[in-house]
């Protein structure tokens, strides 16, 4: 009985260590922010279908000295994209004009830009297979 319990504990410990090694940290620095007013809303997406709709993880970041940084931890290996907007008027939403174009500064991973619409996932995606750092420009 003691051997069985000890074996189970060892197996559980090994599995936990293996899972922990398969997750990574993604650090993102945001550049080009024009003021410290409001906050930066950041979303990390893990599928094309959820891109710009529902983030896998999200953070609201304080802006200091016109810079911001966010760190996402325990991110499994895979393909991801990031989007953000600077909520300059601090109303907790991205303001748009009457046809849906953002009135507040935005940023997307790989500095992906939209043409006649929002940026596309295929232009914004990146592979996470190790701890990594990104820089996103806010325009």
Image (cartoon, rainbow, N blue to C red):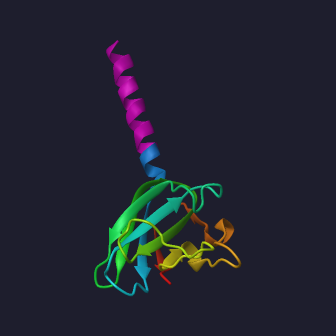
* Residue at (66, 72) in percent of width and height: 123
Residue 131 in view? no
User: Where is residue 36, by image quadrant?
Assistant: bottom left
* Residue at (65, 58) in percent of width and height: 48
| Prevalent SS, magenta region | helix
Residue farthest toward the front in the current orientation of the protein: 98
* Residue at (57, 79) in percent of width and height: 111
State the extent of the magenta-drawn residues as a range.
Answer: 1-18
Q: Nearer the viewer, residue 136 or 36?
A: 36
Q: Nearer the viewer, residue 14 or 88?
A: 88
Residue 114 on the magenta segment: no
Q: Nearer the viewer, residue 81 or 102?
A: 102
Q: Position of residue 3 (x, y in %)?
A: 36, 18
Residue 6 on the magenta segment: yes
Q: Position of residue 83 (x, y in %)?
A: 52, 69
Q: Position of residue 19 (x, y in %)?
A: 46, 44
User: Where is residue 117, by image quadrant?
Assistant: bottom right
Residue farthest toward the right in the current orientation of the protein: 116
Circle count = 0
Q: Nearer the viewer, residue 38 or 114?
A: 38
Residue 99 in view? yes
Q: Is residue 70 left or right of residue 119?
A: left
Q: Is residue 31 above or below residue 19?
A: below
């Amino acid at each position: 009985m003691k051997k069985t319990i000890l074996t189970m504990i060892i197996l559980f410990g090994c599995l936990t260590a293996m899972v922990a090694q398969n997750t990574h940290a993604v650090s993102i620095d945001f550049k080009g922010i024009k003021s410290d007013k409001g906050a930066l809303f950041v979303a990390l997406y893990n599928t094309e279908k959820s891109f710009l709709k529902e983030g896998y993880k999200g953070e609201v970041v304080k802006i200091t000295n016109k810079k911001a940084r966010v760190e996402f931890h325990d991110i499994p290996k895979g393909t991801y994209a990031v989007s953000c907007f600077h909520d300059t008027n601090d109303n907790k939403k991205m303001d748009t004009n009457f046809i849906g174009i953002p009135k507040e500064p935005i940023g997307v991973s790989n500095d992906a830009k939209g043409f006649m619409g929002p940026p596309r996932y295929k232009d914004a995606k990146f592979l996470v297979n190790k701890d990594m750092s990104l820089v996103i420009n806010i325009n």
